[in-house]
Amino acid sequence: MHAGRPASKRDLLPLRKNGFTEPLSIKDAATYVVKRQNDDGGYAFCQGMESNAQDTYYGLATLHRLKVRFPNPKKTIRWLKEFVPYGLHSSYYVAKAWDLCGRDLDSGVNKYLQSIHISKTRSDSTSTHGSRAFRPKDVLMITELLNMTRVETNQKKTTDLLLGYQNRDGGFGLHGQSDLESTYQVVASLHNLNFPVKSLKATLEYVRSCEAPTGGFSLIPNTSPPHMEYTYHGASILDLLGEKANNPKLARYVFRCQQSNGGFARSEFGISTFEDTFYAVSVLQKIGRLQKTERKEALLIPLHLGNKQWMKITKSLEKWSPSS
């Protein structure tokens, strides 16, 4: 819907609230994460909160995408070893964090994952109550984890199950009602199951319909405003389908959500979180808008450095220039 108009120079520049154009500062985004690492090595998006599995994963994943080496990795690994997963979601975040740290999965996490069966997430699509409700997010997590652990699964049965939730508009969702979040979770799951997702032509059209004129993506077409998680979902689906976002204002929308502390929020006037920061950095990476440096090794902070030394080094990253 935006393909017919060429991008102007103004469209391609991220406009901040103060009216100035300013590219994403790797230093600011990375410092936002590092300053929220706790003494135990885990992370929490809000300073003073206890470390948790979700923020630890998103914190590490964000630094990884920014090509910044993790501070205090030994403490983080120790925290992960001592953390006891209590369900699918916490097991997922711990497993992904272990993988980012370059370690084999903890035996407890591995044992839990091997006990998972995707069939547990299936339900009568007419039911919306209790644990029997179909949850695409759970299926996505399970397919990722099964790939990590190389556990065999019935790919055809699971693929057929997922394709059964495609609706007439090309999107995916329960009760014949598509939304972008469910569509992303199903498409990503299908990709994990080696289904040729580029064949989902109707899905591509549905995703395009969720692009907001002002930049970003909305949950459903032409109704709700764009938010960071939906923007991540939309950009990720397009990436899986071998496509790019049409709207030249996408990067500008993402930058508008960066807050003064360097992190990103769900919307322009929200509160920064690790999850939204990961989403924002991922989107900018997918569309080629992350900053580059001529000396990328400057980001490879030595493993033995603590937070105070790391913070001193980040001051040397002021001379960065935006990507072309």
Image (cartoon, rainbow, N blue to C red):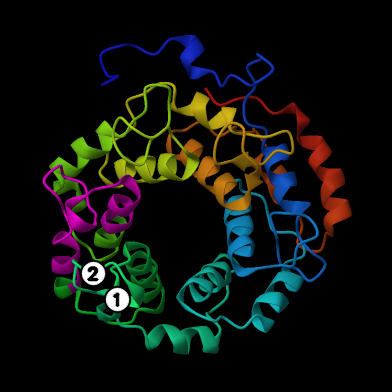
Residue type beneath disc 2 = Ser
Residue type beneath disc 1 = Arg
Q: Could you say which quadrant of the image residue 305 lies in?
A: bottom right
Asked whether residue 301 is in view, the answer is: no
**Who's the residue at 52% across and 73% down the image?**
95
Alpha-carbon neighbours of circle 2 within 10 Å: few (<14), some, or many (≥20)?
A: few
| Place of residue 73 in the rendered image (x, y in percent of width and height, measured from the top left) | 72, 67
Q: Give the distance between the C-alpha atoms of the residues marked 1 and 2, in whole angstroms.
A: 7 Å
Precedes in sequence: disc 1 or disc 2: 2
Q: Could you say which quadrant of the image residue 186 lies in?
A: bottom left
| Place of residue 317 in the rendered image (x, y in percent of width and height, measured from the top left) | 76, 35
Q: Nearer the viewer, residue 49 or 288?
A: 49
**Who's the residue at 65% across and 76% down the image?**
80
| Place of residue 235 in the rendered image (x, y in percent of width and height, measured from the top left) | 38, 40
**In the image, is residue 149 above or below residue 280?**
below
Q: Which residues are magenta?
A: 158-187
Give SS at disc 1. helix
**In the image, is residue 263 above or below residue 223?**
below
State if disc 2 and disc 1 touch (CB < 8 Å): yes
| Place of residue 263 in the rendered image (x, y in percent of width and height, measured from the top left) | 66, 41
Residue at which label 1 appears: 132
- Residue 127: which disc? 2
Q: Nearer the viewer, mark 1 or mark 2?
A: 2
